């Protein structure tokens, strides 16, 4: 359920919204959405500005560039950034997934090395999990880590990841040993991306941001680059992935599209709009329930799966409904001079299919709820 | 030209040509892909082929439209069939025509019209426009020859990355006036049935693509089509397509054209959205047809009105 925000938290949200509504911030966001396809931006000035204020990773300790705040303040930052249209992938990948994984499972040295730059919005990171042919069934991944002295050499191909071209390093899953149980033997490495032995190629796709095909061609990593225990990366994945699965990013996206839809919907759509509004409200409540769970130190995987499924399916429904209600107007790209609402509908429509696939597909969430919540036989 | 069935046209979209037809009005995002010029030549060739096979005079226009949808054909054929249903004093021959009709004001003299029309398909490659508008004389339609300096075109940047244009007619010369409001209503009803059939064909093709993938793609040690969660969803879509196909081929389809199109519109968006999910992230790749069906469905499903407009119109007509 929705936490009761303190007056300080309300004030914080207000102050954040004020910053995100400044003309130069809005201008930068609008410009970034009109960049020619394939030349998408990485970190923007607004990220750096929030980073300098200690807002970007606000729940991290001050020594790592945060402000020692709680997950609630962090969630407010995420929610407002998305509501205001700040491109969020670069932020969620670098801070919410990779940064959070380092924060929770990294060594002191790894934290000091990576977290301050991420928190200040100076560097970013991405995730190298999926491979050609290996998606939801991640345990079947084939990228190899061959022993090399006290370290390893990584070889394999990683696809469907984003922002590799802007990232300094990546959290990469590779197989260090094989055995009868394929969950075991996966190790997570922090891999420098802009270096010899790593080839990054764009993969053009439906959405607004390119995918990258990252070929690891024998790049060497040392013991200091292992996150967590060797062979035991699955444990880390099992703990970090649900943390990002509050669904708050999706509910905020749904809110943003819906707000634009409300502003542009012709008469006759009232009932459908109310139906969508109710769904989006429920989505937001499910997301905040997960944030509250984390805040209380009681993460709940069924709640996370429910929130991920419901919020992403809702965001997708709102995006498709915009076409249904607005007609061809909704299809204009941000780059068209007559685009309404900065082209938010077209971008949302092209992003929508990915929402129910990334970060654990809807099918994985459904399976989890069927078996873990309902107790159905697997 | 004798009237012909659609078998020959089905044969025309063979395994060699079909993939090219699907992409012949798609400007790739990012790098690579053919040029606009190549695509236009391809469309011109397909137009010649279809016209040569009697598509303009087919006895089975609804079947033809479904076939075009399943081939993801992009071109002025459906608009041209509608234009040919209206009585004109001039012979259209086999010329392609684009519809630029809206129930919006325009300014008209005896010989010219001025109007701005949005989302006109293939405006840069037709010989004529059928421009519709409303003034004190009520709704009327004018045939306007393309290529006049008084006509300006602008191609939209839009989801399908296809051939949709904003067209400005500034005192464009009228070649002929046509039809009464009744004639347009009849032609529009037929156009809607054909558009609905096109969407049924598109939905079927998107489903076929997903079913083929579900049979071969393996995850967790088995083809994903073996998971009942997926299999049942695909079956359900197949049955919805079947039901909507019955509506569009029914002999009374034209009487229920608006409601039928609304149903086909929902069908096409639903099927393409759900089949995207079956394909996983692979379906989003530029060279995968799944995303092409998804984008085309978005555009084609609202070409002749949004579902709520169409349903309202149906409801009002029943009052």
Image: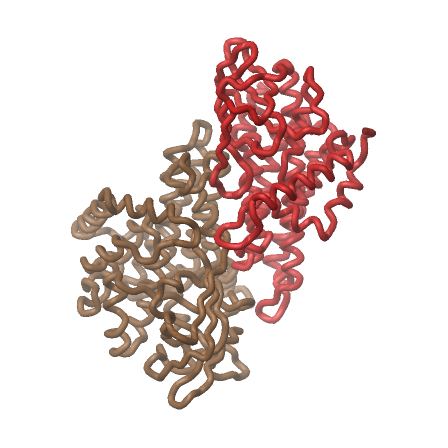
Q: Quadrant of the C terminus of chain A?
A: bottom right
Q: Nearer the viewer, residue B127 or A102?
A: B127
* Residue B51 in the image: above or below residue A72: above
Q: Is residue A42 visible?
A: yes
Residue at the image position 49 percent from the left and 38 percent from the top: A323
Q: Nearer the viewer, residue B64 or A301?
A: B64
Q: Position of residue B266 (x, y in %)?
A: 57, 39
Most extreme residue toward the bottom is: A149
Q: Nearer the viewer, residue A248 or B49?
A: B49
Q: Nearer the viewer, residue B134 or B263?
A: B134
* Residue A96 in the image: above or below residue A326: below
The hue of chain B in the figure is: red
Q: Quadrant of residue B190?
A: top right
Q: Position of residue B254 (x, y in %)?
A: 68, 26
Residue at the image position 76 percent from the left and 29 percent from the top: B57
* Residue B281 in the image: above or below residue B108: below
Q: Which chain is brown?
A: A
Q: Position of residue B251 (x, y in %)?
A: 74, 29
């Amino acid at each position: 359920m929705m936490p009761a925000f303190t007056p300080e938290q309300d004030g914080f949200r207000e102050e954040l919204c004020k910053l995100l509504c400044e003309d130069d911030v809005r201008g930068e966001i609008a410009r970034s959405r009109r960049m020619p396809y394939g030349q998408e931006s990485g970190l923007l000035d607004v990220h750096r500005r929030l980073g300098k204020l200690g807002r970007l990773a606000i729940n991290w300790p001050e020594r790592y560039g945060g402000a020692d705040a709680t997950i609630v303040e962090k969630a407010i930052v995420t929610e407002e950034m998305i509501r205001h249209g700040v491109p969020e992938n670069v932020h969620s990948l670098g801070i919410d997934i990779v940064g959070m994984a380092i924060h929770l499972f990294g060594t002191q040295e790894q934290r000091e090395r990576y977290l301050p730059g991420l928190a200040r919005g100076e560097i970013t990171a991405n995730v190298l999990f999926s491979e050609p042919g290996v998606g939801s069934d991640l345990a079947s991944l084939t990228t190899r880590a061959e022993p090399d002295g006290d370290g390893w050499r990584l070889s394999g191909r990683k696809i469907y990841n984003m922002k590799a071209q802007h990232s300094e390093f990546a959290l990469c899953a590779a197989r260090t040993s094989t055995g009868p149980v394929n969950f075991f033997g996966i190790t997570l490495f922090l891999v420098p991306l802009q270096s010899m032995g790593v080839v990054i190629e764009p993969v053009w796709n439906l959405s607004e941001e390119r995918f990258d095909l990252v070929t690891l061609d024998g790049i060497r990593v040392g013991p200091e680059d292992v996150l967590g225990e060797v062979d035991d990366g699955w444990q880390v994945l099992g703990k970090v992935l649900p943390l990002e699965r509050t669904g708050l990013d999706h509910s905020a996206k749904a809110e943003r599209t819906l707000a634009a839809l409300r502003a542009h919907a012709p008469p006759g759509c009232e009932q459908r709009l109310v139906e969508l509004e109710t769904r989006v409200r429920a989505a937001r409540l499910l997301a905040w329930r997960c944030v509250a769970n984390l805040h209380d130190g009681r993460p709940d995987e069924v709640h996370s799966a429910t929130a991920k499924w419901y919020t992403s399916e809702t965001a997708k429904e709102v995006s498709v409904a915009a076409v249904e209600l607005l007609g061809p107007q909704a299809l204009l790209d941000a780059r068209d001079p007559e685009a309404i609402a900065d082209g938010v509908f077209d971008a949302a429509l092209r992003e929508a299919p990915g929402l129910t696939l990334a970060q654990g597909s809807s099918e994985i969430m459904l399976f989890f709820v069927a078996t873990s919540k309902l107790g159905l036989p697997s | 030209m004798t009237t012909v069935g659609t078998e020959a046209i089905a044969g025309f979209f063979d395994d060699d040509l079909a993939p090219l037809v699907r992409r012949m009005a798609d400007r790739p995002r990012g790098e690579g892909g053919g040029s606009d010029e190549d695509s236009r030549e391809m469309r011109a060739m397909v137009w010649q082929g279809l016209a040569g096979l009697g598509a303009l005079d087919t006895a089975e226009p609804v079947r033809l439209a479904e076939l075009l949808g399943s081939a993801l054909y992009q071109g002025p054929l459906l608009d041209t069939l509608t234009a040919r249903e209206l009585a004109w004093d001039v012979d259209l021959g086999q010329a392609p025509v684009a519809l630029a009709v809206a129930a919006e004001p325009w300014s008209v003299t005896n010989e010219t019209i001025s109007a701005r029309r949005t989302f006109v398909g293939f405006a840069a490659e037709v010989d004529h426009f059928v421009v519709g508008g409303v003034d004190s004389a009520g709704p009327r339609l004018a045939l306007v020859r393309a290529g006049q300096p008084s006509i300006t075109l602008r191609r939209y940047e839009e989801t399908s990355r296809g051939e949709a244009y904003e067209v400005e007619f500034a005192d464009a010369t009228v070649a002929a006036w046509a039809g009464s409001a009744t004639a347009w209503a009849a032609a529009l009803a037929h156009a809607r049935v054909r558009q609905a059939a096109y969407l049924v064909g598109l939905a079927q093709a998107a489903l076929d693509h997903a079913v083929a993938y579900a049979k071969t793609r393996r995850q967790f040690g088995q083809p994903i089509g073996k998971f009942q969660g997926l299999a049942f969803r695909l079956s359900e879509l197949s049955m919805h397509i079947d039901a909507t196909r019955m509506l569009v081929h029914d002999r009374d389809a034209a009487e229920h054209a608006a409601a039928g199109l609304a149903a086909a519109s929902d069908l096409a968006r639903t099927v393409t959205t759900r089949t995207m999910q079956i394909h996983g992230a692979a379906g989003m790749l530029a060279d995968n047809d799944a995303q092409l069906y998804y984008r085309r469905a978005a555009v084609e499903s609202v070409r002749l009105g949004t579902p709520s407009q169409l349903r309202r119109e149906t409801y009002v007509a029943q009052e």
